[in-house]
Amino acid sequence: MPFVKIEMTREGITREKKQQLIKGITDLFTNIFNKDPHLTHIAIQEIELDNWGYAGAQISVLREKGITADKK
Amino acid sequence: MPFVKIEMTREGITREKKQQLIKGITDLFTNIFNKDPHLTHIAIQEIELDNWGYAGAQISVLREKGITADKK
Amino acid sequence: MPFVKIEMTREGITREKKQQLIKGITDLFTNIFNKDPHLTHIAIQEIELDNWGYAGAQISVLREKGITADKK
Amino acid sequence: MPFVKIEMTREGITREKKQQLIKGITDLFTNIFNKDPHLTHIAIQEIELDNWGYAGAQISVLREKGITADKK
Amino acid sequence: MPFVKIEMTREGITREKKQQLIKGITDLFTNIFNKDPHLTHIAIQEIELDNWGYAGAQISVLREKGITADKK
Amino acid sequence: MPFVKIEMTREGITREKKQQLIKGITDLFTNIFNKDPHLTHIAIQEIELDNWGYAGAQISVLREKGITADKK
């Protein structure tokens, strides 16, 4: 407790970025809730672009049209 | 809101059928709940046949025996 | 197969609308994938407005500001 | 994309702490992956202590014995 | 690792039965995979009968018709 | 009802062990709750070692250091 499940599109996520995310989320639970980090488990699920739908369309189609998820 | 997670066995699901499913579910949320489609996310998780259990057996074993999930 | 998990904010969802959603999603799996409806399970999880975050804010705070999820 | 689902035991989590968590996780996705925060959704699921098992025991039983999840 | 999430209909599940289930599943992971039980977390999610769909219908409606999930 | 989702690290899990787990969990639901096994679905999700975080670190890093999940 807690278990954190992350679903995100599979788009070039490096091992280093995954480690940063895991460290960052674990620290949030320790800092906000004083949770023992040995009780914090996190799983990252990368989803193929054909398998994620947003606004009724596949992400793969949106990406082909040049629509990204980037912060402007 | 909403987020829809679909778990289904990996059995020849085409890109076109995934798109139909994504469009169909998104439309349901718009039609029934008046949800802005930009807030509807859908993720399809295809599960290997060895990894899905039904009635105590692996789907891969059921398929080898000729048992399908087809509507009769 | 399939199992569909729906996470949505708890905001006055009636029993009738849940039934429409369940029927609609089950029909999509039958029509698109020819799935036996006795193998389609759907669970709706209603999430309290304090417990859903969007763009870094709680939905309860967004609703207090008059920001809705309605389709315009 | 992403959708983050947090499962944690229901033990006096205040509205303010939930907001801190939501803000912190959203910022991680923006900072590490440059994700538009309008695409980051987070749902917190609080689980009753009778309904979480750890090391074969219910958390409610562990808490009655004085065993906590606190960082030492 | 592992994390086990159980979704089941809320129908008079006692604390004792939950404990039996938690103990039984944890033991399976230890016996089959030699997993340290301190790494096995289990969460039970009870779903309201209006919120579970099976074969296109709400479980609450099926129960009113006398259809149960009991093993014959 | 029930649907059981298992998330575990992908570390040499054989087809036979998956079958044992599926059979074991299905039997628990039948024995404890008298559930019809035709209503028990189980999905096993194997997570890459880079994608699971425990105590703030990737499992792949822990394994490189010789830290296992084995019961002592």
Image (cartoon, coloured by chain):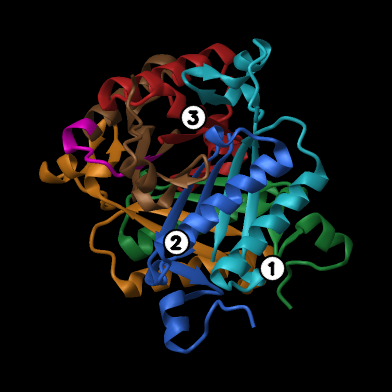
Chain colours: A blue, B orange, C green, D cyan, E red, F brown
Q: Do the residues labelled 1 and 2 touch (CB within 8 Å)?
A: no
B17 shown above or below C27: below
Please report the residue visible at 52 percent of the width from the left and 81 percent of the height from the top: A68
Q: Nearer the viewer, residue A38 or A69?
A: A38
Res. B34 mark: 1
Residue bearing the label numbered 3: E42
Please report the residue visible at 26 percent of the width from the left and 24 percent of the height from the top: E32
Q: Helix or strand or loop: what does disc 2 sit on?
A: helix
Crowding at mark 1 (Cα within 10 Å: few <14, some 14-19, many 20+):
some
Closer to us: mark 1 or mark 2? 2
F10 is within the stretch colored magenta: yes
F66 left or right of C4?
A: left
Please report the residue visible at 40 percent of the width from the left and 17 percent of the height from the top: E24
Q: Distance between the residues labelled 1 and 2?
A: 40 Å
Q: Are marks 3 and 2 in contact (CB under 8 Å)?
A: no
A68 shown above or below B40: below
In this rendering, do the residues under marks 3 and 1 share a single chain? Answer: no
Residue A59: percent from the left, percent from the top?
46, 75
Q: Helix or strand or loop: what does disc 3 sit on?
A: strand
C13 shown above or below C31: above
C66 is within the stretch colored magenta: no
- Give the amino acid at mark 2: Glu
Residue A62: percent from the left, percent from the top?
47, 82
- Give the amino acid at mark 3: Ile
- The quarter of the rendered structure image containing the C terminus of chain D is top right
- Magenta residues span F7-17
Closer to us: mark 3 or mark 1? 3
State whether residue B68 appears in this view.
yes
- Give the amino acid at mark 1: Asn
Residue bearing the label numbered 2: A16
- Judging from the image, mark 3 belongs to the subunit labelled E
